[in-house]
Image (cartoon, grey):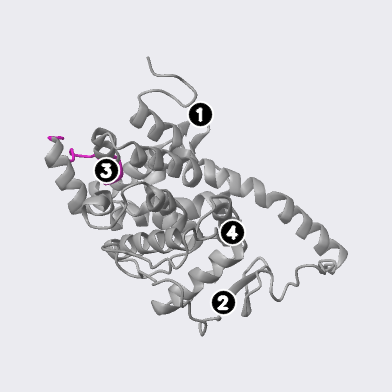
Amino acid sequence: MNFYKRYTGDYARDTVHLSMVEDGAYNRLMDFYYSTEKPLPADRKAVYRIARATDKAEQKAVDSVLSEFFQDTAEGFRHKRIDAEIEKAKPKADANRENGKKGGRPRKTQPTDNPPQNPMGFQQVTQTEPNGEPALVNHSHSQKNNTYSSGVGDSKGVGPVDNSDSPPPLSADAIGEQLVLLEAERGRTLRLSSRAHEALLRLETRHVALPVLLRAHALACARRAADGDPSAVNPGFLEPFIDEAMAPGQGGGTAADWDETTEGVQAKASELGIPPQQDGEAWFWFRLRVIRDSGEQHRIEREVSKAERMNPNEFERVYRLMYGVAPGQVAA
């Protein structure tokens, strides 16, 4: 594959704990995997050469990435997500080759019920991605919401004002529109791709009302700030924070959000008497270990659910860590 989509929200969520060297190694290995459409070699020395890891520190970073994101198989180091993306792209690549032989891609019949110039009901312009699909760029930033406070940029004391006894759940389009407006207030332009629309449809099934959306957005913004990530909060990045926003007792404050910062996790570990991060232990797994030992069920379930949705390659490992058994088994 000469081109593959990069879902920045998913990637940032799954790799926020990586060091700069580990992040660079992971990107080089992914690029090689996609370009060859084959698993990485079983020989680690060959993998080191692919990542251009020449000293012990760089090779240790490669080992860490292989352990966390790849599976050691007889065919080499496999990555389930990349394998799935390659398999998904094959029919389209084959069709493109056939169309090329026939003189080009056939003209598409445009649907009449959802015009392509406005598929989500927003004012927008389009950009073209390398695969020919439009990437939506929403510019409807002039509208203001006068019903609720935005709560943007800080997870402390988020208290949206609700003018009704029971705010109605938002549709996928309404959630997308609110996110665009919230990000515009932060000075960011949110682009809603087809993948973002899929996340919006999933959020719609959660029956998310505006106060919950604002709370989740504030938590997501706080996470972006803690990570030093200036990216916009897109629907995929927002999704895992919905559970926390809906959890009982989430009235705001740093105590409720202890697992969102390095300092909070370390403080919780000290409070519970949990041994500090071990040599060679990735921050990702140390944080999960502290969440598990905290016994806070809504956080445990959130992390397991997040792994199942966002990183199937690690789902079983996260599940075993949290519950002590494989998925589908019952603890004794």
Helix, strand or loop under label 4: helix
Q: Residue 58 lies in magenta, yes or no?
A: no
Question: Residue under circle 2?
Answer: 138
Magenta span of residues: 273-286
Q: Which residue: 16% across, 35% down?
A: 274
Label 2 and label 4: CA atoms lie apart by 15 Å
Which comes sooner in the sequence, label 2 or label 1?
Answer: 1
Label 2 and label 1: CA atoms lie apart by 46 Å
Label 1 and label 3: CA atoms lie apart by 31 Å
Predominant SS along the magenta part: loop
Give the x, y percent position of residue 93.
71, 55
Which comes sooner in the sequence, label 1 or label 3?
Answer: 1
- The three-letter amino acid code for the residue at tag 3 is Arg
Nearest-to-viewer mark from 1 and 3: 3
**Is residue 135 something that shows in the picture?**
yes
Give the x, y percent position of residue 123.
62, 80
- The three-letter amino acid code for the residue at tag 1 is Ala
Q: Which of 202 and 26 is in front in this view?
A: 202
Give the x, y percent position of residue 234.
48, 64
Which comes sooner in the sequence, label 2 or label 4?
Answer: 2
Question: Residue under circle 4?
Answer: 195
Quadrant of the rendered structure where residue 154 is? bottom left
Q: Residue furthest top?
A: 332
Question: Residue under circle 1?
Answer: 74
Q: Which residue: 37% across, 47% down?
A: 247
Give me the disc on residue 287: 3
Q: Nearer the viewer, residue 297 or 24?
A: 297
Tell me the crowding category of disc 3: few under 14, some 14 to 19, or many 20 or more residues within 10 angstroms, Cα based. many
Helix, strand or loop under label 2: strand
Look at the numbered discs 2 and 1 and tell me whether their residues touch, using CB distance below 8 Å.
Answer: no
- The three-letter amino acid code for the residue at tag 2 is Asn
